Image (cartoon, grey):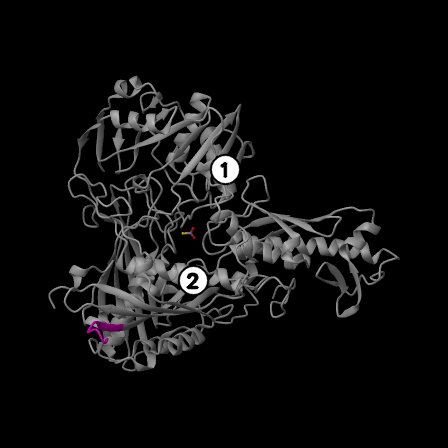
Amino acid sequence: MPDTLDPHVRFGSNSGQPITRRDGLAKVTGGATFAADNSPDSVLHAVYVPATIARGRVTALDTAAAEAHPGVTHVVTPQNRPPLQGDPSDKPTMFSFRFEALQDDTVRYAGQPIALILGETLEAATEGARLLNPRYEIATPRTGLDDAAHYTFDPDAFGKPADTVHGDPEAGHAAAAHSVDVTYETAPQYHNAMETHAVVASWDGDRLSLDMPSQALSMTCAGIAYYFGIPAENVTLRSPYLGGGFGSKAIPTGPYVLAVLAARMTGRPVKMMLTRQQMFGPVGHRGQTRQRLRLGTDAEGRLTVLDHAGLSATSTFDDFIEPAANASQGLYAAGALRSTHSAVRLDVGTPGPMRAPGEASGSAALECAMDEMAETLGMDPLEFRLRNYAETEPGTGKPFSSKALRECYAQGAERFGWADRPLQPGQMRDSDGLRVGWGMGTAFFPCPMFMAEANATLRADGTAMVETSAADMGQGAWTALAQIAADSLGLPLDQVEFRAGHSGLPDAGVAGGSGHTATAGSALHAAGGDVIRQLGEIAAADPDSPLHGAGNAGYTARDGRLYVAGDDSRSDAFADILARAGGAEVSGAGSASRAPEAAEAHAMNAHGAVFAEVKVDPDLYQMRVTRLVGAFAAGRIINPRLAESQLYGGMIWGLSFALHEEARHDPARGHIVNADLAGYHVPVNADVHGLDVISVHEDDPYVNALGVKGVGEIGITGTVGAIGNAIWHATGKRVRQFPIRIEDLLGD
Ligand code: MOS
């Protein structure tokens, strides 16, 4: 157990408080500056020109017509595009994917760049782009899972999900008294954060300045620097606010590189912001999947085997394999477990991490298959899960660092009223005659830590400044991380200045994987602890301090005072200690990453249970999710208001996955026909009727010194399956693809 902090002891007055966002006022009054709000003098506007076919070749562009436009300054095409120093096929950082940046005239997916137009105004550049009138040689696009050969990859290669087998699956199938064999499909989805990808790039010699939303500042700087042949420290990246990311803003993608290239080529600052339509292709997506689940149980309903085979779509030029089948490795205690993955290359942009990559798609299929198994057994779905959830990590038998799943099931079911659920489908109607169905799903998500660093400075006046490059995508990092920092320094929140969102600050790692609070928060906690330790040394050595000579006892810091540990009668104010020491500041540093021995000894996951009520119109088959109740145990909650909001968000994305989001390709040209927010549906307020989140208390002494797990993505898991299962319960119809559409329910 880490000795830096006993997580069972509350360590300050800030953590645990439902403080509103510190940046809320700036955001709602327009004071917060997003990347595209920056307009340096003499800025050129870049307009990205995407391919409108998915496969083939560009045979002609009317570059002369575009260049003749009086406001157009440059037309950049593969013919005149200056070289990059780093090959776009290389992988300079952990999150690197090969990208299209006008290397040649080949079209590999719809939305790939075929030109970049620069103009004195956005309007001129936009008109210039229209004048290009591209012509193509069109090849038959492959956009469906059966349009190309399925392949198996080397699972040891980076980013490829490993195939995992525990026990003897064939024996498990043979021993099963009951079994199901079902195949689910999930649609391609596109992140579509509210803020589209934007960049303002300026060069000064070989130094590059960027305003650009980033979930991973130092990795983005390193990636961009590589392509331009400069040291990473020559890149200054400002990313104070992001209008959402969902995974798509962790990677320096092709459009960004082209805008930076245009700035270097012209010697002027360049601004580019993708349109909503242009978000469908070059900046990643969630690849479509097909998942076959074969489950078997003994006569009592105990799983003898859980066999999950995933097929994921990737692009023709790089591999991101949605690790969907891995979802079956962490949750249920089957006699044998097998997860395998294969892939298919389609004429689409390379997928990437999006809102619980792997877990979201995998849990959707797994939780529905679990329901089908319960149905086969004639067993209540919750009872079936209670019989099968794992007390130790399935396969390895490792203990969990903490696991409050049973409490999540119990509290969620109680709040929802699950006990009144009829076993058979199609039994419930509301007073308007709508069919009512109830379903549930188990939620879970890993709780990783990345590497982060932070600094803290206690100023002579007793206030403090802390800094780390942390990214706030809207989740509330500016607030929750500041709460942790304030507690580590024993100060009220309003006396701590929090600096973040700049690449010059200590590296806060990645805001992703639901690990940002745990990672950056732990670094801030350590930095504050370093300051307090030094302050204690100063006080102990000072004959005029009430703490003189107390060095061995240790200290606690609260409300701007240092106390001898366990002796509240002896204390000294921070400002007094520093004043007697000559008015100096005290600076400390901290870093954080998961202790390898802790990861070795324990399986670490957050858990939850989601219960859904749907209503289905018996004539029109319109589906409404009328209630979602989620109970989640995710370790220490730093800010209940923001954590609840994160969990609401995850559950809404689950609703979105279940009933709304789907990119559809034109069969002839392969482009996405619904590439905007009119055609690509996400839930709006009218789709979200009742959300209820229960935060289940959980002390985890192993995950990190703070006991923080993470709440960013777990809400989507469990929810998708719960809604699919509720639709079955309302209608008796089992739809095995997401999103579930009205036409899937017709004809019963
Ligand atoms: Mo993410 S998909 O953890 O930004």
* Residue 214 spot, x, y in % from top left: 46, 43
Residue type at numbered disc 1: Ala
**Residue at the extreme right of the image, as rendered:** 543
Q: Is mark 1 within 8 Å of ligand 1?
A: no
Mark yes or no: residue 608 visible.
yes
In this rendering, the answer to whether 303 lies above or below 267 is below
Q: Is mark 2 within 8 Å of ligand 1?
A: no
Neighbours of disc 2 within 10 Å: few (<14), some (14-19), many (20+): many
Q: Nearer the viewer, residue 251 or 596?
A: 251
Residue in view at x 22 percent, y 48 percent: 664
* Residue 161 spot, x, y in % from top left: 36, 53
Residue in view at x 80 percent, y 47 percent: 583
Neighbours of disc 1 within 10 Å: few (<14), some (14-19), many (20+): some
* Residue 646 spot, x, y in % from top left: 44, 59
**Residue at the extreme front of the image, as rendered:** 29
Give the extent of the magenta segment. 430-437
- Contact (CB < 8 A) between labels 1 and 2? no
Residue 690 included in the magenta stretch of the image:
no
Residue tagged 2: 647
* Residue 269 spot, x, y in % from top left: 46, 27
Residue tagged 1: 222
In this rendering, the answer to whether 232 lies above or below 686 is above
Tell me the SS state at disc 2. Answer: helix
Horizontally, residue 274 falls left or right of residue 25, namely left
Tell me the SS state at disc 1. Answer: helix
Residue in view at x 19 percent, y 74 percent: 433
**Which comes before the other along the chain, label 1 or label 2?**
1
| Magenta span dominant secondary structure | loop
